[in-house]
Image (cartoon, helix red, strand yellow):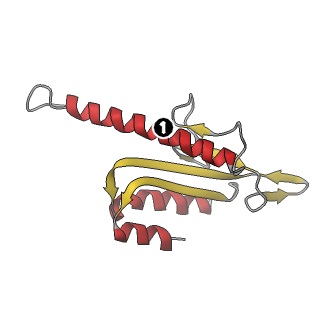
Amino acid sequence: MFTQYEGRYESLAQDVRARLITESVLLKAISDWSRKLGLVSYEKVATRDGEQIPRVGTFAWDLTAPSYRSFLTKSDGDKQKPGFLACDILLGEKIGVGGIRPFLQKCHSLRALRNVGPTIQMFVADSFSHDAFKGLTTAF
């Protein structure tokens, strides 16, 4: 990539680093919150800070965890299949309709997969525009 002047991307790198650190702290808080509620399996919470990318179905998420809560499990004969909690996070900007569209597409595609248990999907951000928030609440 060509730069127009020396040091053009250093300030952007610092902003992104600060955002990623803040998001990691918030992901830890969401992890602890979901564990203490008993929503997810205590030792099975995975975040993007781990060694492997957390996945539910064919999609990567910022945080995932299996859940054996009765409203999320499915019976497969005499075996229980878990449901999941899947969370994406984006801090530092107000999310508009264009910003939630990829998340909504990911959620709709995940729900169409047959071999994936019921999933609670979360999108965490600083703030949402009115239209984006309305789109999230009416999408499902």
x and y percentages locating residue 45 in the rendered image:
64, 40
| Quadrant for the N terminus in the image | top left
x and y percentages locating residue 76 in the rendered image:
84, 56
| Residue at 34 percent of width and 34 percent of height | 18
- Please name the residue that numbered disc 1 is placed on: 25
Left or right relative to 71: residue 85: left
| Residue at 60 percent of width and 42 percent of height | 31
Instruction: Give above or below for 37 relative to 104.
Output: above
Left or right relative to 92: residue 52: right
* Residue at the farthest top position: 6
Instruction: Give above or below for 31 relative to 95.
Output: above
Secondary structure of the residue carrying tag 1 is: helix
Say what amino acid the circle numbered 1 marks. Answer: Val
Q: Which one is nearer the viewer's eye here, 119 or 34? A: 34
Q: Quadrant of residue 29?
A: top right
| Residue at 42 percent of width and 72 percent of height | 134
Task: Report crowding for label 1: few under 14, some 14 to 19, many 20 or more residues within 10 A (C-alpha).
Answer: few
| Quadrant for the C terminus in the image | bottom right
Left or right relative to 43: residue 27: left
Instruction: Give above or below for 56 relative to 139.
Output: above
